[in-house]
Amino acid sequence: MSPAPYPEVELHLVMDNYATHKRVEVRDWLAANPRIHVHFTPTSGSWLNLVEVWFGIIERQAIRRGTFRSVRELTGKIRDFINGWNNRRHPFIWTKTPNQILTKIERKKTSLTRH
């Protein structure tokens, strides 16, 4: 990734907590690009997987097998999909209550699993 398209602004990357960012090459690149700020999802943040579900829905229903002559055309198609989704009001339905999720997060760990 090159930060060149946005030379005057800070960029914020949201990354999962996988080990890729721990590689020496990645750490060196980030150190050489101080306006790039990396934020990591919590280790116990599997509930954030709904973001991946959402992008999968957009990909399947708005992008896949499409032909786009420009980035503007692609982003327009994505925006049209999002506007249509919002107009139909299709919320994601949680299957667990906030208390159930928080109880699981606060539960004492019984192993020394390292990620």
Image: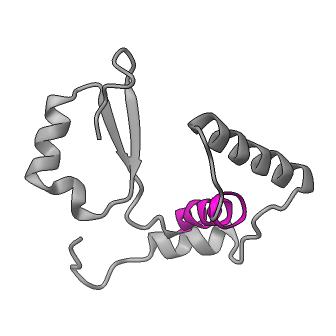
Q: How is the image coloured?
A: one colour
Residue 98 in the figure: left or right of residue 43: right
Tell me if residue 51 is in the magenta stretch: yes
Q: Is residue 63 above or below residue 98?
A: above
Residue 80 in the figure: left or right of residue 39: right
The part of the chain drawn in magenta is: 47-64
Residue 100 x %, y %: 62, 75
Q: Which residue is farthest right?
A: 88
Q: Which residue is farthest bottom?
A: 110
Residue 54 x %, y %: 64, 61
For the stretch drawn in magenta, the main secondary structure is helix
Q: Nearer the viewer, residue 78 or 17?
A: 78
Residue 6 x %, y %: 39, 23
Q: Nearer the viewer, residue 46 or 99?
A: 46
Residue plotted at (63% across, 64% down): 64
Q: Nearer the viewer, residue 56 or 11?
A: 56
Quarter occupied by residue 115: bottom left
Tell me if residue 90 is in the magenta stretch: no
Residue plotted at (58% across, 38% down): 70
